[in-house]
Image (cartoon, rainbow, N blue to C red):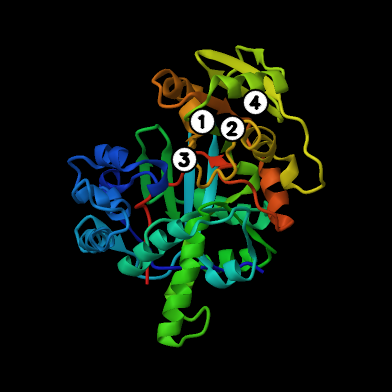
């Protein structure tokens, strides 16, 4: 039984959404955030990346950063640009590109469900990133950004979504710089959605494991302070957008290796029978393309022994067969010699990084399937980090949950 929780969302007034909405905090670095928010004091990046308003040498985890984020959020919520709904609601959120549309439910999920594995995970979290998000939430007394969830398709939920989107216009519509159209509706009977989701056995984290874990830590901290029971307080819930699995679009999560010796590449070439290719993006599962010294190469990854769901993943096969034995990259979460490039940036970005000497070698991956994510989650296993890149992404600043 999955719990969803209507809430009184804060959102931009429709005429101001273009000034406020921004990409999620974790798809850019500080310099990119500065450029996006430049000359726009209302951009939501001032809340989720508040270091952009502080001196360049300010540590990302300093007290000043968290206090500035809280100050910026309070100022924005008290401004003429934002408003809060008078009664708890559930929202419909639609993302539309030229070739793809997905429609989800923007609501709150339960920390209890996260702690009790009704909400299933597929990645480990890093304590330092947990600490960072937890401090942001506690200092702001808000969950500023939603997490992306998925669920097994339900005819009942699809009917409720269509009933809302086909009978009334969206109250917010925003076309982002990348051309993605974002639309939001308010549901008139949130209880119908609550009852429909209560029939689902599980929800699945697609993107946002650290925000989920941080929401759990915030709830635990504040319940101890308030001596309250789980589920009593608004901080026991955190915002999510739930998309049906049939609509989820996963792009590859590519890799770059910063330093590669000629001996390492020769070993790779010999061990895996690399062949020159014009195919920059692999066309089938198990294939990878490699860019080195201005030339693209291709190979197929052998299967790993074992019957776990993780052992069949390309990311796991790459790690065990190439990254560890050839490049001595044992832990991709901590090794500075590897970095990751979201699939939305394409193979042109990989070529640019190598050609400009910001990396020596790039690896273009085949995308993980949603069925693979679900199988790993259902078995209680964990994917290698950076196995999935979901696109398009929900905008931050469209709806904020305070407690």
Give the residue drawn at x 67%, y 69%: 1
Q: Where is residue 264 in the image (x, y as percent from the top left)?
A: 59, 24
Q: Where is residue 188 in the image (x, y as percent from the top left)?
A: 47, 63
Give the residue drawn at x 44%, y 56%: 129
Tell me if label 2 and label 1 are in contact, CB under 8 Å: yes
User: How far apart are the alpha carbons under marks 2 and 1?
Assistant: 9 Å
Tell me if label 4 and label 3 are in contact, CB under 8 Å: no
Q: Alpha-carbon neighbours of circle 3 within 10 Å: few (<14), some, or many (≥20)?
A: few
User: How far apart are the alpha carbons under marks 3 and 1?
Assistant: 9 Å
| Closer-to-camera residue (272/24) | 272
Q: Name the residue under label 3.
A: 336
Direction front: furthest residue: 263
Q: Alpha-carbon neighbours of circle 1 within 10 Å: few (<14), some, or many (≥20)?
A: many
Ranked by sequence position, the earlier of labels 2 and 1 is 1
Q: Name the residue under label 2.
A: 327
Ranked by sequence position, the earlier of labels 2 and 4 is 4
What is the number of callouts on the image? 4
Q: Nearer the viewer, mark 1 or mark 4?
A: 1
Label annotation for residue 257: 1
Tell me if label 1 and label 4 are in contact, CB under 8 Å: no
Q: Is residue 122 above or below residue 402?
A: above
Q: Is residue 318 left or right of residue 16?
A: right
Q: In which quadrant of the rendered image does the C terminus lie?
A: bottom left
Q: Position of residue 65 (x, y in %)?
A: 26, 58
Q: Position of residue 358 (x, y in %)?
A: 40, 26
Give the residue drawn at x 21%, y 45%: 56
Q: SS at mark 4?
A: strand
Q: Nearer the viewer, mark 2 or mark 4?
A: 2
Label annotation for residue 299: none
Q: SS at mark 3?
A: loop
Q: Name the residue under label 4.
A: 288
């Amino acid at each position: 039984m999955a719990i969803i929780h209507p809430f009184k969302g804060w959102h931009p007034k429709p005429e101001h959404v273009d000034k406020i909405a921004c990409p999620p905090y974790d798809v850019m670095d500080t310099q990119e955030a500065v450029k996006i928010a430049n000359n726009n004091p209302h951009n939501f990046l001032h809340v989720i990346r508040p270091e952009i308003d502080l001196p360049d040498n300010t540590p990302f985890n300093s007290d000043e950063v968290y206090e500035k984020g809280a100050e910026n959020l309070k100022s924005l919520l008290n401004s003429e640009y934002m408003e809060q709904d008078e009664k708890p609601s559930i929202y419909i959120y639609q993302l539309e590109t030229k070739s793809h549309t997905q429609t989800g439910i923007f609501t709150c999920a339960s920390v209890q469900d996260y702690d009790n594995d009704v909400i299933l995970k597929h990645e480990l979290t890093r304590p330092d990133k947990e600490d960072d998000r937890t401090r942001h939430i506690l200092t702001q007394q808000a969950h500023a950004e939603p997490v992306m969830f998925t669920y097994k398709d339900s005819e009942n939920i699809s009917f409720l979504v269509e009933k809302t989107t086909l009978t009334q216009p969206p109250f917010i519509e925003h076309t982002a710089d990348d051309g993605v159209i974002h639309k939001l509706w308010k549901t008139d009977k949130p209880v119908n959605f609550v009852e429909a989701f209560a029939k689902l056995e599980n929800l699945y984290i697609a993107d946002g494991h650290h925000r989920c874990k941080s929401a759990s830590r915030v709830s635990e901290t504040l319940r101890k302070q308030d001596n309250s029971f789980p589920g009593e307080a608004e901080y026991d819930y955190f915002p999510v957008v739930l998309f049906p699995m049939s609509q989820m679009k996963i792009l590859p999560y590519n890799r770059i290796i910063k330093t590669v010796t000629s001996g390492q590449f020769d070993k790779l070439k010999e061990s895996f029978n690399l062949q020159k290719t014009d195919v920059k993006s692999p066309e089938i599962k198990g294939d990878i393309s490699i860019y080195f010294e201005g030339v693209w190469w291709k190979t197929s990854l052998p299967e790993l022994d074992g019957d776990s769901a993780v052992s069949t993943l390309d990311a796991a096969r790459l790690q065990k067969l190439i990254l560890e034995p050839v490049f001595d990259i044992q832990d991709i979460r901590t090794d500075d010699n590897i970095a990751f490039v979201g699939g939305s940036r394409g193979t042109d970005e990989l070529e640019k990084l190598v050609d400009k000497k910001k990396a020596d070698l790039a690896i273009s991956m085949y995308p993980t399937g949603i069925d693979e994510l679900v199988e790993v989650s259902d078995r209680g296993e964990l994917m290698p980090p950076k196995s999935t890149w979901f696109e398009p992404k929900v905008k931050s600043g469209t709806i904020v949950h305070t407690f």
